Image: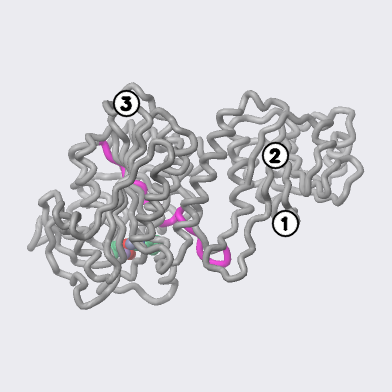
Amino acid sequence: MNFELKQLDLIGAADEKADVMVLLVPKDFKPGKDGLSLLVSGAIKSGDLEATAGKCLSLYRPLQAAATRLIVAQVADGSARSVRTAVLAALTAGKSPNLKKLVVCFAQVAKEESVRAAVHAVADATYAYTTTKSKPTPRVLSKVIIGLANPADVTPVFERAVATVAGVELAKEWANRPANHATPQLLGEAAQALAGRAKISCELLGPKEVAKLGMGSFMAVAQGSDQPLRFIVLRYNGAAKSKAPTVLVGKGITFDSGGISIKPAGDMDEMKFDMSGAASVLGTFKTLSLLKPAINVVGLIPACENLINGKAVKPGDVVTSMSGQTIEILNTDAEGRLVLCDALTYAERFKPRAVVDIATLTGACVVALGAVRSGMFSGDDELAAGLASAGERAQDLCWRMPLDDEYAEGLKSNFADMANIAGRTGGAITAAKFLQRFTEKFAWAHLDIAGSAWKSGAQKGATGRPVGLLVEFLLGQPLDK
Ligand code: BES
Ligand code: MN
Ligand code: ZN
């Protein structure tokens, strides 16, 4: 799918050939004397295009435009959210097997965040998963023109949005793949495929190397599966070696059965998405490879299955993490923190400016925040503010959660330095408190994406979040620190 930014006023838009043209109209639309203007102002006057974002009017072979189908869509206040709503609604109305060329045209001067929202919404609405279908119906849309009166104002944001969409789609692809098509080894190969591109290198560690590093906690999760674990180390070097990198750590549980503390059967298939954090790291690196910013980034992915065989870790087993701290595994289903803690310790060697882990960590986070916002945890106010504002800019929202020490009390163990679970309440926070014990040497934040990384039900599928947030966060940070 090729995106192009083009200068178009309504007169130009009328001449633009397309299978579908979406014309985004604000509630304070100021008509000119051209045919499209008259059509739109007539529709508004007659009450057929209400001033609510997402209201659409569809026309076939209209006299006023060269496009085969014209969808006039209301963007009300013109905010990023309204543009997203309008584009999604218009493309639902304009769904067609013949949609090869699409024009999305702003009928008013467009803001940066609105252009970004339009690019993301077009990609979301037309995404198609095909990898494991025998008769795939891939996306036929090949050309998308974003038309507006002021392209020069928004070119950098447009280019960033197009590169981010490519990262989001790589994240969707890997998160959507079933676990037998996305094993730890295959995830490792996906990371390797990114290397060799501009400024990216990749190192894959297997069971032997991980044992040598002393990652006893990660190994405890992996030991119940016949698939060998992988520890993936990605590096993006866009700046001088002396610049401290930001480290992204993605939870890469390619399938989470719960282990001996097994999960109920209903919806267990969705635990193929338990490597969405890892997928978001891969996606972010894809975007970095396209934008080539002058920063350094490290991506760490502990990848394994949480399964059950004769060697599987048992409730009550005590393991020694790479940090030296011992952990009593009271619940084998709280495995994400067990793989992440060793990756966090590994992150120390990069002397990072900040470490952000991304994980489908707790059902409790889904209860707390639903699918709208990811949970964000950090003891560092500056880092927390940076992530929150990146989320706002990308419209990939998160919400800061507390980390009071009292929440850690339930992690006490009679047989180890800590247990891997606390009581029933505040589960997203107690999980974060567990991770925090492995982050003393750097500024750290944790994103719990259990609710935001995928959709259930008829729309079941990965969302590609929080690639948008991560890209904005990485590119938004000052370089001179
Ligand atoms: N991968 C799950 C978290 C999850 C559950 C994400 C449901 C999305 C939907 C994680 O490994 C897990 O099982 N967490 C447990 C922790 C508990 C045992 C303390 C949970 O949330 O139930
Ligand atoms: Mn689990
Ligand atoms: Zn899990």
Given residues 223 and 24, the one toward you in this image is: 223
Quadrant location of residue 152? Answer: top right
Residue type pointed to by label 3: Ala
Residue type pointed to by label 1: Lys
Q: Is residue 302 above or below residue 243?
A: below
Q: Which residue is mark 3?
A: 240
Q: Which residue is mark 2?
A: 145
| Distance in Å between CA atoms under marks 1 and 3 | 47 Å
Magenta run includes residue 466: no
Q: Which residue is mark 1?
A: 95
Residue found 89% across the figure and 40% down from its top: 64
Q: SS class of the residue under badge 2?
A: strand
Closer to the observer: label 3 or label 2? Answer: 3
Q: Is mark 2 within 8 Å of ligand 1?
A: no
The image quadrant where one finds ligand 2 is bottom left
Colouring convention used in this rendered image of the protein:
one colour
